[in-house]
Image (tube, rainbow, N blue to C red):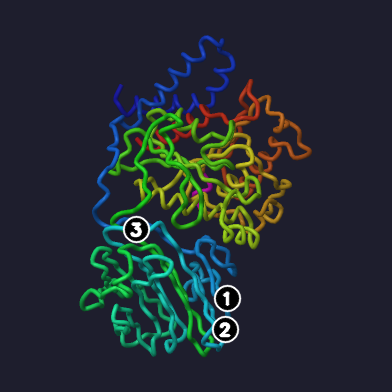
């Protein structure tokens, strides 16, 4: 029998084993259960990555890597973006809107309606300071008036500006330098035209270069503004529409940050609670709180699957809400990068999030924040740790308030979805207006990836909140049936439920890991 046939048979076996695991555990006498679980762990690790130790402090220097990306495509039109800090909003509006040149794209619009030059609109983003190497910030910009200032600037800290350009400085693009004067770098700016502007900082020399549409247009490096007093670091980007005596609009899109040395990355790995977690972190783009555990043998030289789990208590909650820790323990040599992201929609409480997140949720819905948080955090983890292009999506119980919206809104990002007894508090109709819990804001996706997306829910036979077989009320069994009906009415063909004997309302760790790992093996010949 050749190796490909053996591989196929092994994968098929694992696919069947994930559905049988809990049933076998229920039937086995207690004395044999540890033996069975040890055998299962061995089988699941046979195709995993190696166990090479990771250097405690690997070399991170080198070419610039993605630090953050702001596309504004996930935001709600007419509402200020949750990703940014918006202030000085006088005489106008700052919102996410359609790109004036492409209705299929969204961008940030700073619309100044006042003719008072003292009024202005400002949005900024603060980061953990980058303290060495180089940093580049690139943005697409577009203006409707070229006679007044639209700023794009970088700051060493909250009080010290160091670099930037002014778009529309009497018809020109000018750059700020240490002398206090504005250097002309483009003599004629056109209205209603997108320009790509990049500011590249040298943190040790305290200089910067300006690129326009990928071409360097500074003849030599410019000295930073406030060069003498500015620390050699970067921590803030800012966009401002100001000084205009006419109503005008400043559009921002596709803001990309890269850095040669990214602060805050973790390189730990392990399978126990003390060594498998990074501690609570904050997403660099969207203010999402998360924890991360790298698999044994992680290296940036290969691609890794990302397992994302949403729960109210993040990593360190009381059982059964410490699911991510237990998944990390049970992962063994399986290659999953495990990420636990805290979501607001589980409890509807503040959950420790900043006021701009709470304001955004109040103006839209908690699921819409969770969508941004999960997708943008996934993109960050993917860039930082060489993750694969889709992630494995998981949740338990009230996690369904974020689990199902992501399944229905963003199937193109998900490799496979699996949960334990998740909520879906719609009333059962197929119309998105009938889904409840904030899902009325968006239609179910029509992305082709939805059709064969594997979606599995495990429910315990003795789960008291599931109310298996009861078709009235809000039991979780009926909630799943409603979710499945909604998905299938919109073209999903692979949504299923397994009832696991002998267990109640809990996370079904072994069955879920087997399900995800079998899918991983079946798609990685």
Query: Which residue is outermost to the front?
Result: 229
Looking at the image, is mark 3 or mark 2 earlier in the sequence? 2
Left or right of residue 186, residue 20 in this image: right
Q: Position of residue 126 (x, y in %)?
A: 44, 62
- Label 1 to label 2: alpha-carbon separation: 8 Å
Q: Position of residue 94 (x, y in %)?
A: 55, 73
Q: Is residue 355 above or below residue 2?
A: below
Q: Is residue 435 above or below residue 325?
A: below
Q: Which element is circle 2 on?
A: loop
Residue 130's disc is: 3
Range covered by the magenta-colored residues:
448-452
- Label 3 to label 1: alpha-carbon separation: 31 Å
Q: Callout 2: few (<14), some (14-19), or many (20+) C-alpha neighbours within 10 Å?
A: some
> In the image, which is nearer the foreground, mark 3 or mark 2?
3
Q: Callout 1: few (<14), some (14-19), or many (20+) C-alpha neighbours within 10 Å?
A: some
- Label 3 to label 2: alpha-carbon separation: 36 Å
Q: Callout 3: few (<14), some (14-19), or many (20+) C-alpha neighbours within 10 Å?
A: many
Q: Is residue 172 above or below residue 302?
A: below
Q: Is residue 450 magenta?
A: yes
Contact? badges 3 and 2 (CB < 8 Å) = no
* Residue underneath mark 2: 113
């Amino acid at each position: 029998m050749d190796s490909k046939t053996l591989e196929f048979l092994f994968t098929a076996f694992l696919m069947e084993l994930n559905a049988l695991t809990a049933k076998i555990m229920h039937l086995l006498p207690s004395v044999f259960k540890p033996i069975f679980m040890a055998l299962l762990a061995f089988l699941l690790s046979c195709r995993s990555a190696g166990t090479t130790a990771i250097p405690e402090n690997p070399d991170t220097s080198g070419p610039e890597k993605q630090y953050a990306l702001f596309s504004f495509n996930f935001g709600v039109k007419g509402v200020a973006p949750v990703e940014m800090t918006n202030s000085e909003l006088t005489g106008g509006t700052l919102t996410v809107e359609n790109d004036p040149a492409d209705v299929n794209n969204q961008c940030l619009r700073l619309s100044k309606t006042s003719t008072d030059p003292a009024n202005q609109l400002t949005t900024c983003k603060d980061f953990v300071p980058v303290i060495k190497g180089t940093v580049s910030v690139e943005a697409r910009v577009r203006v409707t008036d070229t006679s007044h200032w639209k700023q794009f600037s970088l700051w060493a800290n909250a009080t010290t500006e160091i670099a930037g350009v002014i778009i529309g400085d009497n018809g020109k693009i000018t750059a700020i330098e240490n002398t206090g004067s504005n250097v002309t770098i483009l003599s004629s700016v056109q209205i209603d035209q997108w320009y790509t502007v990049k500011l590249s900082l040298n943190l040790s020399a305290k200089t910067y270069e300006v690129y326009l549409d990928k071409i360097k247009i500074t003849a030599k490096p410019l000295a930073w503004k406030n060069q003498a007093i500015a620390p050699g670091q970067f921590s803030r980007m800012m966009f401002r529409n100001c000084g205009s005596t006419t109503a005008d609009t400043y559009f921002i899109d596709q803001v990309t940050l890269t850095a040669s040395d990214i602060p805050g990355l973790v390189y730990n790995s392990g399978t126990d609670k003390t060594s498998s977690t990074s501690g609570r972190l904050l997403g660099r783009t969207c203010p999402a709180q998360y924890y991360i555990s790298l698999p044994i043998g992680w290296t940036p030289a290969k691609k890794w699957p990302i397992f994302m789990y949403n729960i109210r208590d993040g990593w360190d909650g009381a059982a059964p809400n410490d699911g991510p820790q237990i998944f990390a323990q049970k992962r063994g040599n399986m290659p999953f990068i495990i990420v636990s992201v805290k979501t607001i929609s589980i409890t509807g409480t503040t959950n420790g999030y900043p006021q701009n997140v709470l304001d955004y949720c109040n103006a839209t819905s908690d699921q819409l924040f969770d969508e941004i948080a999960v997708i943008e955090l996934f993109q960050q983890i993917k860039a930082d740790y060489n993750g694969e292009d889709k992630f494995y999506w998981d949740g338990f119980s009230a996690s369904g308030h974020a689990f199902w919206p992501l399944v229905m809104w963003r199937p193109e990002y998900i490799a496979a979805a699996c949960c334990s007894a998740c909520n879906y508090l719609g009333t059962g109709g197929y119309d998105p207006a009938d889904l409840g819990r904030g899902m009325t804001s968006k239609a179910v996706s029509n992305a082709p990836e939805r059709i064969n997306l594997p979606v599995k829910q495990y429910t315990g036979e003795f789960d008291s909140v599931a109310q298996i077989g009861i078709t009235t009320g809000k039991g979780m069994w009926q909630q799943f049936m409603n979710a499945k009906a909604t998905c299938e009415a919109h073209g999903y063909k692979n949504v299923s439920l397994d009832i696991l004997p002998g267990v109640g309302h809990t996370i079904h760790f072994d069955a879920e890991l087997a399900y995800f790992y079998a899918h991983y093996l079946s798609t990685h010949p």
